[in-house]
């Protein structure tokens, strides 16, 4: 008997659901829905979603919401069948064969959006844990995620289906509390509620916001709900009296209107309290009316009547009819003060405006109406208009200007690519993996050597598509290739990436030019024997603002060498206090203020450094090498590195010297010790350094099979001191050899 009762109840629910789903459809479309109900229930069985909700229950709830939005039969069918491909290997083909290719395409669109869920949820969770959910970077990334979500759909109905699915999920969590609902609520407020707002689907927007707010801030939600409920009877009576007053005035002028109290949305009330910094009693739309009339003229007439009955509150009037919102929301909003001091908000709109306000884009959607020629054009125009809405810009425009929308929408060519970490990067359509690398970071682009697209190796000139995940393969060091600037190769599509590559080569050329010019000036000054010349001052005397400009001019043959010689001689003579002829081409020391006291032939005030590879120490025979950007590097003549560089660039070699016995300073030098390993060996060698007051700045020891090799980096004043240390170490017990590194 019990099973019979359940069977009757189930049959009753089935018939009621089918009737609701079929509302506004033809008999043939209702038949397709009935077939889809049976097919989906058979495929889903008792399977559940990650939230714990049964898939069949979710699909039915989602379809009922879509029917409430008055979308077409294909949208309702897609809602019922959204998860079929996940449970049927040939699900897409079965849907296409039984219910049409349009339905199959909508289901595929839903599946593409569902693949974004791990990314969006992971990002929301990461930003929340990091405590930076309100940072500028996070807000910008959320904006890109919204745009990516929209860019991945080819049919706007898919977005509405996704919103319906999220609404159904929140309804389920309202009845079945779960820890996951907090994360889902946060994602909803960041992504889906703004999306519903942009599409103008208020019927879903308010529910998405209220349920999410309830999960995220339960105590605040209950507090506002309690305050609303405490004065509910008083407020309802006040609204009833206001309705009768407005109806009476409008009837007297022969204006047909529907007047009723507007629903109260807790999230909206809290948002206004928070943004305006006011108390609950100061929120004007706690008490609100909505007036719906037949024409625009009646809207403004009604506004005049409302302002005549009650006192308008300054700065609380918005004319969204003359100036629609970015989602084409149109209505008159005003707030008035009643004789008893209480405030009242009034919204005034036409029926067309009301349908758009409640259903948004769904109210405008008529798929391929009329003849094929006219219907197709109108369909494409509406596609263009809707895509313009989804660009997430705040420009106000006239929805009747379809052609202008179409042209603007055509310019919105953007793709959205994911990094391996789940961050979304927006790029212009046609961008390549190399463009992506430069967009993420300039250095990543410079060192880019390959790319993986969705886990597979792909050429760097591969044009990317929205939703792909790209991983850049890099070299440890290096720069771009000149081939990247060749348009025929197709490596770079974006202007930003092309500019960065050009800047890199320009910088490289500048370094080479500076190095060549520095070598020219250094050799010329050396040839003149004017070691006392201050190059910065010399550059100023020749009309340059700094020495680098002098070097560039020399490298480009733009420098008058005769003038350089004249100024250099005069400068040196003034510093030395003698005539030009008293200067001889011999090594001259750098001024006493130079801390290391290194003596360099020919030039003064040039950036110099002792090469780390050979660590020269007075009186080692040395030579200088003009480097790129680091001045002159001083090497020992027998240094293998120097010999290699000199062979490659002989024009950069510059004669240098220590200046004999006058050279002063502290110099780093390497010592290598080979010995038979024993206990106390390192201690004995260290005692020598301590007795001789030698500072050790580096130690590296290795021991293998009774043999020890020790490396020390020490600071000495000259080569004689270094030789003495080597001799003392050689006398230590067990030391086989002690030599300079």
Image (cartoon, helix red, strand yellow):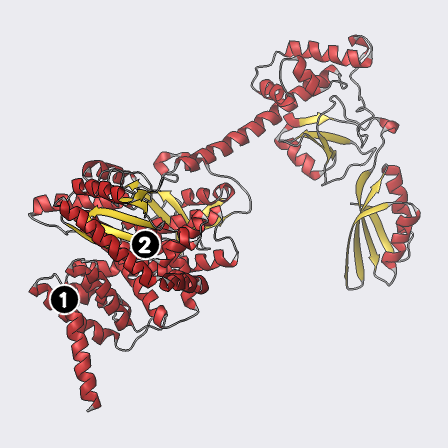
Question: Residue 482: percent from the left, percent from the top?
Answer: 45, 35
Question: Residue 290: percent from the left, percent from the top?
Answer: 24, 51
Q: Nearer the viewer, mark 2 or mark 1?
A: 2
Which residue position is annotated with label 1?
98
Q: Residue furthest right?
A: 691
In front of the other: 201 or 378: 201
Left or right of 698? Residue 324 is: left
- Image vertical order of residue 309 relative to residue 468, above or below: above
Q: Label for residue 287? A: 2
* Quadrant housing residue 9: bottom left
Question: Residue 355: percent from the left, percent from the top?
Answer: 20, 51
Distance CA(mark 2)–CA(mark 1)? 51 Å
Q: Which residue does the image show at 33% across and 72% down from the upper left?
A: 53
Left or right of 680? Residue 354 is: left
- Image vertical order of residue 3 relative to residue 478, above or below: below
The quarter of the picture where the C terminus appears is top right
Left or right of 49? Residue 401 is: left
Disc 2 packing (10 Å; few <14; some 14–19; many ≥20): many
């Amino acid at each position: 008997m019990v099973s019979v009762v359940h069977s009757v109840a189930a049959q009753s629910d089935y018939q009621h659901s089918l009737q609701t789903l079929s509302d506004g459809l033809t008999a043939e479309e209702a038949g397709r829905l009935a077939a889809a109900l049976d097919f989906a229930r058979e495929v889903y069985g008792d399977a559940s979603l990650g939230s714990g909700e049964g898939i069949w229950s979710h699909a039915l709830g989602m379809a009922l919401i879509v029917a409430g939005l008055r979308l077409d039969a294909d949208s309702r069918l897609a809602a019922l069948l959204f998860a079929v491909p996940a449970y049927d290997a040939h699900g897409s083909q079965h849907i296409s064969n039984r219910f049409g290719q349009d339905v199959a395409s909508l289901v595929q669109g839903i599946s593409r959006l569902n693949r974004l869920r791990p990314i969006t949820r992971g990002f929301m969770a990461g930003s929340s844990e990091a405590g930076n959910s309100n940072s500028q970077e996070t807000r910008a990334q959320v904006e890109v995620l919204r745009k990516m979500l929209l860019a991945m759909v080819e049919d706007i109905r898919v977005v509405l289906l996704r919103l319906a699915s999220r609404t159904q999920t929140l309804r389920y969590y309202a009845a079945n509390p779960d820890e996951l609902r907090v994360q889902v609520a946060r994602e909803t407020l960041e992504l889906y509620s703004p999306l519903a707002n942009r599409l103008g689907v208020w019927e879903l927007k308010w529910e998405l916001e209220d349920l999410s707010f309830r999960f995220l801030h339960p105590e605040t939600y209950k507090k506002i709900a309690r305050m609303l409920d405490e004065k509910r009877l008083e407020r309802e009576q006040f609204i009833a009296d206001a309705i009768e007053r407005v109806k009476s005035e409008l009837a007297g002028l022969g204006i047909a209107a529907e007047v009723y109290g507007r629903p109260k949305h807790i999230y909206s009330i809290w948002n206004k309290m928070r943004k305006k910094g006011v108390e609950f009693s100061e929120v004007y739309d706690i008490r609100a009316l909505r007036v719906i009339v037949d024409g625009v003229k009646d809207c403004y007439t009604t506004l005049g009547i409302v302002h005549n009955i009650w006192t308008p509150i300054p700065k609380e009037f918005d004319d969204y009819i003359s100036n629609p919102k970015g989602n084409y929301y149109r209505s008159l909003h005003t707030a008035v003060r009643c004789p008893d001091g209480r405030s009242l908000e009034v919204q005034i709109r036409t029926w067309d405006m009301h349908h758009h306000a409640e259903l948004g884009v769904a109210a405008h959607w008529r798929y391929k109406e009329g003849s094929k020629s006219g219907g197709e054009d109108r369909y494409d125009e509406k596609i263009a208009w809707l895509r313009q809405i989804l660009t997430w810009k705040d420009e106000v425009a006239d929805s009747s200007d379809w052609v202008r929308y179409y042209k603007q929408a055509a310019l919105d060519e953007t793709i959205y690519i994911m990094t391996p970490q789940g961050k979304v990067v927006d790029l212009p359509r046609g961008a390549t993996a190399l463009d992506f690398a430069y967009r993420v970071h300039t250095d990543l682009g410079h060192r880019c050597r390959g790319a993986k697209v969705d886990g597979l190796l792909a050429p760097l000139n591969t044009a990317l598509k929205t939703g792909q995940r790209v991983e850049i393969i890099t070299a440890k060091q290096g720069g771009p290739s000149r081939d990247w600037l060749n348009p025929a190769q197709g490596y770079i599509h974006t202007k930003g990436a092309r500019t960065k590559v050009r800047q890199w080569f320009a910088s490289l050329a500048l370094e080479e030019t500076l190095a060549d010019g520095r070598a020219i000036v250094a050799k010329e000054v050396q040839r003149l024997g004017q070691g006392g010349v201050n190059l910065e001052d010399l550059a100023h005397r020749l009309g340059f603002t700094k020495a680098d400009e002098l070097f560039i001019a020399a490298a480009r043959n733009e420098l008058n060498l005769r003038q350089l010689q004249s100024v250099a001689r005069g400068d040196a003579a003034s510093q030395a206090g003698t005539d030009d002829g008293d200067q001889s081409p011999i090594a001259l020391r750098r001024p006493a203020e130079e801390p290391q006291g290194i003596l360099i032939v020919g030039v003064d005030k040039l950036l110099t450094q002792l090469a780390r590879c050979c660590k020269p120490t007075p009186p080692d025979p040395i030579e200088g090498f003009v480097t790129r950007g680091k001045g002159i590097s001083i090497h020992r003549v027998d240094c293998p590195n120097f010999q290699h560089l000199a062979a490659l660039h002989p024009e950069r070699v510059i004669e240098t010297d220590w200046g004999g016995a006058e050279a002063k300073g502290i110099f780093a030098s390497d010592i290598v010790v080979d010995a038979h390993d024993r206990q106390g060996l390192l201690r004995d060698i260290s005692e020598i350094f301590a007795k001789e007051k030698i500072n050790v700045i580096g130690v590296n020891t290795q021991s293998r099979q009774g043999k020890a090799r020790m490396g020390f980096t020490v600071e000495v004043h000259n080569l004689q001191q270094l030789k003495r240390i080597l001799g003392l170490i050689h006398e230590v017990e067990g030391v086989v050899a002690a030599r300079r590194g």
